[in-house]
Image (cartoon, rainbow, N blue to C red):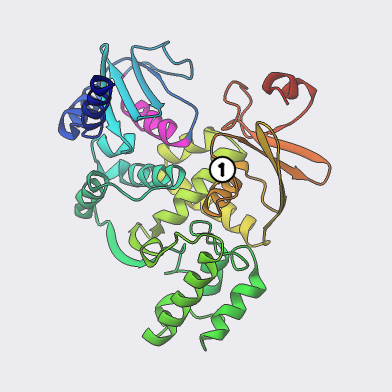
Amino acid sequence: MVKRNSKEIVMEVFLGEPNNQEIREVVRNVYSKDNLCLSAYYSIEPILFSFIISKNTKNSFTLSFIPEECETQIRLDANGKWIIDNKKKYFLGQNSFCSYLPITAEDVLPIVSCIITSTILDRRSLSEWELETIREMEKFDMTIEKNLKIPAYKTLPAFLSLMFSLDPYIPGISGNRENAISLIREVNASEISKLEDLNESQLNTLLFRIISTIVKENPKFTRDDIITDRFFYLDYDILELAFSLIYSFDTIGSNEILQFVLSSSYAEALISRFRQTLSKGFSINSIENKQSYYIVETSNLTSPLLAQIILLQLQKIRRDKMIVIRDNDRLFTSRFFIPSVKKEGLIKIDDRVKNLIGI
């Protein structure tokens, strides 16, 4: 028993300390291969990583979702993330795969977006390594500041930033235009005011209201969860862009990610689509807990992955169970939850899919 525990402790220490410089060199070597076959799991972060590499592969590039089909693999297990190359395994911990990519002016936006999507889906803060990587981008005019973790506060009225906030999800405010406007009025500000228009007293009142609203559903929520490092590049709010990428990936498919990696200006289309969807308002109305999945009834929230992100914050669900959205009489999920299905985007739960996933 003592020996087993000792081994477990040693293993935990070993896995908890990735050799970041060594991994960066491994990724640089993968990045520079003339021909590359890369096996990945189906999620937005590894797909972003793969497409950024594919753009720089000189000859042929193959992306496979079969785990051991390629010599170069990126994996996720209970311990964290791994890169396998030339039969050697490299442990990344929770660090984003993209934090090890060579930083070029052309790839700044895809890389930083990838890192932030990783933190959103993993439900974690940036690691010191990831923050150091993003700071390297300041030479390309990346802007970093401490401020509220609500999207697009530099460009949108504050009520819209609050209404569009998914992480943190603000119960009764996120997705509700009227309540978001009422909150801004309660701090004695105009409904068209931007966050920067509020004085210190108004900001403190707003911050208090946000925190007190969230802790009713999530007692672990603190000021540090709402005041965070914020990143802006080419007038894009990276938090908003990351959520826009997650939404399009989940509801449409990985081709949206490829278009963004090939042309950063496609970010405008992604954000526009996302804002248009959220501006209609949205809500989560009920949750049914089944043996291996949840049925989530929503209004105007068609992304199962976004529903999961919200419900994990509210501590209503477990991460290891699939999300099925109920929209009137329709039931659907997305490939993120059933990666064995080749169809991308939203997937209707018909008899064939039920048999496949055991519903």
Whether residue 205 sits left or right of residue 170 in the image: it is left
Residue 236 picture location, percent across and down: 40, 57
Q: Secondary structure at mark 1?
A: helix
316 or 66, nearer to the observer: 316
- For label 1, the residue is 248
Is residue 161 magenta-colored? no
Q: Quadrant of the C terminus?
A: top right
Quarter of the image where one finds residue 281: bottom right
Residue 96 picture location, percent across and down: 33, 38
The part of the chain drawn in magenta is 44-58
Is residue 50 magenta-colored? yes
Quarter of the image where one finds residue 85: top left
Q: Specify whether residue 157 is in view.
A: no
Q: Specify whether residue 310 is in view.
A: yes
What amino acid is at disc 1? Ser
Question: Dot 1, crowdedness within 10 Å: few (<14), some or many (≥20)?
Answer: many
Whether residue 168 sits left or right of residue 142 in the image: it is right
**Compared with residue 227, is residue 22 higher up or lower down, i.e. above or below?**
above
Residue 147 picture location, percent across and down: 35, 68
**Compared with residue 11, is residue 253 higher up or lower down, i.e. above or below?**
below
**Compared with residue 156, is residue 144 higher up or lower down, i.e. above or below?**
above
**Residue found 48% across the figure and 37% down from its top:** 257
Q: Residue placed farthest to the front in the image?
A: 1
- Total residue callouts: 1
Q: Quadrant of the N terminus?
A: top left
Q: Residue placed farthest to the bottom in the image?
A: 188
